[in-house]
Image: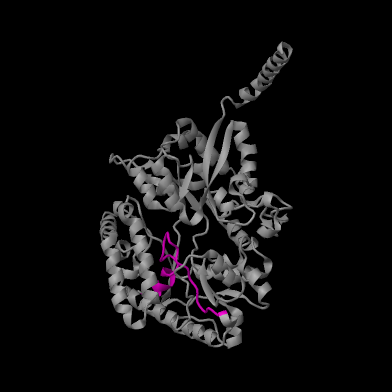
């Protein structure tokens, strides 16, 4: 027994001695938690992807920093981040498109001020973003007349936002030209329905209602109905986010109501079901949809390629038909040069905050950005041009799971692929896609830049948006569902009641505060109307 006990003790001592170096190796290491969007790409594990392993090897290991990617669903990121920040569980580096949330935490000084950290550890960040772009993340919170850096605005390389797509094969079958205004577009929808061009499940027009921003998809064509002879620049900024309340918009929603009641509109438009939408797109049931300018041809979800497999000869092309009569323009909103907002919550220790800035700075070094955005030659892409731009970029389905990636979500400082110059960046936009679709993509981007106006934002917090924003968005979702799907004779009553409900829920306060911000000169963006 004693002999056995002695052997056990000796073994314990031996194991303890063996483990000493392992513990010693961990001394001085810190963990850096980084938010990463999860877009539910099949086979892509956000929390254990090639990009994480690359960053760990080339940044984390040399600096004794353990990187951890924290997955957050893309389309509910604002709600998730609100909960995490409120509970003190947010990652050390967070990103969001929710400017009101960022402004709220600036007001309460719940974020790290980044000026000193950037001066010491962010030379590459400053070089990549530049002074003009950095200003988007600056505010004078203490009122001393000096603006401080509270967040990093990602650099948006392509500001194009609106892509409207129509079936070329349906137009050819109908012997119709591409629509150029609302009347010719409506004629196409009705003809496609009458001819059952998508079979028994023909759906001439589709758009989605996203819970986080219910009107984001529909506003892009409802703006064609706004009467800009009755809209001042001040009104445009005051009613940012509430275009349904601007003069003329009511007739636009009446038009949608007519399409719905004639069976020309996707009947489940108010149910956010990506699976059903994808299935209908891939099987060729839709005759029109609206998303990003390159959406049909993206490698992670190639609607065009898969649709033509199911329906030989099917083809999406860009259409520029939402013509505003009062301006005589085909309006398109475009992003500002700043992309998402990158923040470091105050819950991070100073050591972790330093590590966060160092990581983002490392990301801005050209060779690191190239790797995070493009992956491995021979796997994610097969060759490069003389200018070093990857070509023959592989569809996500053709890439092994261990090398699947999402460039924009992991290399978040750059909203778009960066190759060192505007010329190379533009060339890369088309090269990133299958050669047979490049002409369609170029045309779509041309349309997206036609008569474009820059989205509105404010350089001071809109407190009412923080207080009422979630409830207002919910009411806007109810508004869209009711006014589009009600009987035509009930439209006016439903529209007026739904607008009033949105106002009563907090929109009135938001509009008033946005008007005050405009009057104080604390606004960004452009007014597409005529100066009055």
Q: Position of residue 421 (x, y in %)?
A: 57, 53
Relative horizontal placement of residue 487, taking residue 266 as reference (left or right)? left
Q: Indicate yes or no whether the magenta region holds residue 211.
A: yes
Residue at 28% over, 59% down: 506
Q: Is residue 431 visible?
A: yes
Q: Quadrant of residue 328?
A: bottom left
Residue at 57% over, 82% down: 200
Q: Indicate yes or no whether the magenta region holds residue 112.
A: no
Q: Residue furthest top?
A: 2
What residue span does the magenta drawing correspond to? 201-225
Q: Position of residue 355 (x, y in %)?
A: 52, 34
Residue at 52% over, 42% down: 34
Q: Position of residue 213 (x, y in %)?
A: 41, 61
Q: Quarter holding the N terminus?
A: top right
Q: Main secondary structure of the magenta part?
A: loop
Q: Position of residue 440 (x, y in %)?
A: 60, 71
Up/down of 135 relative to 523, above or below: above
Q: Residue furthest front?
A: 1
């Amino acid at each position: 027994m004693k002999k056995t006990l002695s052997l056990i003790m000796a073994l314990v001592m031996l194991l303890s001695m063996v483990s000493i170096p392992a513990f010693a190796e961990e001394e001085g290491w810190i963990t850096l938690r980084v938010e990463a969007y999860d877009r539910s790409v099949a086979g892509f594990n956000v929390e254990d992807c090639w990009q994480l392993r690359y960053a760990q090897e080339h940044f984390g290991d040399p600096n004794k920093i353990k990187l951890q990617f924290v997955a957050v669903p893309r389309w509910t990121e604002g709600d998730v981040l609100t909960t995490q920040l409120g509970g003190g569980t947010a990652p050390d580096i967070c990103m969001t498109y929710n400017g009101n949330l960022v402004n709220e935490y600036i007001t309460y000084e719940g974020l790290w001020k980044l000026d000193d950290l950037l001066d010491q550890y962010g030379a590459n960040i400053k070089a990549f973003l530049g002074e003009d772009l950095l200003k988007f993340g600056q505010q004078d919170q203490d009122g001393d007349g000096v603006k401080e850096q509270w967040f990093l605005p990602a650099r948006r390389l392509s500001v194009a936002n609106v892509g409207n797509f129509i079936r070329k094969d349906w137009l050819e079958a109908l012997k119709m030209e591409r629509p150029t205004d609302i009347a010719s577009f409506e004629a196409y929808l009705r003809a496609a329905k009458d001819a059952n061009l998508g079979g028994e499940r023909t759906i001439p027009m589709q758009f989605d209602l996203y819970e986080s921003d219910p009107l984001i998809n529909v506003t892009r064509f409802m703006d064609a109905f706004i009467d800009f002879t009755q809209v001042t620049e001040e009104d445009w900024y005051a009613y940012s986010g509430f275009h349904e309340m601007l003069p003329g918009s009511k007739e636009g929603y009446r038009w949608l109501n007519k399409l719905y009641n004639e069976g020309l509109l996707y009947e489940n438009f108010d149910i956010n079901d990506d699976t059903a939408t994808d299935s209908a797109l891939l099987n060729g049931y839709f005759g029109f949809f609206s998303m990003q300018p390159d959406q049909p041809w993206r490698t992670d979800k190639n609607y065009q390629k898969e649709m033509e497999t199911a329906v030989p000869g099917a083809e999406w092309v860009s259409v520029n038909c939402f013509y505003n009569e009062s301006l005589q323009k085909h309006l398109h909103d475009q992003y500002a040069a700043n992309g998402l907002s990158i923040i470091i919550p105050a819950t991070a220790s100073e050591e972790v905050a330093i590590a966060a800035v160092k990581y983002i700075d490392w990301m801005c070094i050209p060779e690191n950005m190239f790797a995070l955005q493009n992956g491995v030659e021979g796997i994610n892409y097969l060759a490069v041009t003389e200018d070093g731009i990857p070509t023959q970029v592989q569809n996500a389905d053709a890439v092994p799971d261990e090398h699947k990636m999402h460039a924009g979500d992991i290399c978040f400082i750059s909203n778009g692929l960066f190759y060192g110059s505007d010329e190379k960046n533009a060339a890369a936009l088309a090269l990133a896609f299958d050669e047979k679709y490049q002409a369609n993509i170029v045309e779509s981007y041309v349309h997206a830049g036609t008569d474009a106006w820059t989205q509105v934002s404010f350089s001071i917090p809109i407190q009412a948006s923080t207080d009422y924003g979630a409830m207002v968005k919910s009411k806007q979702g109810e508004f869209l569902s009711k006014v589009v799907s009600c009987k035509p004779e009930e439209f006016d009553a439903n529209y007026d009641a739904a607008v009033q409900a949105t106002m009563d829920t907090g929109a009135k306060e938001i509009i008033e505060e946005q008007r005050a911000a405009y009057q104080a000169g604390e606004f960004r963006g452009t007014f597409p109307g005529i100066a009055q």
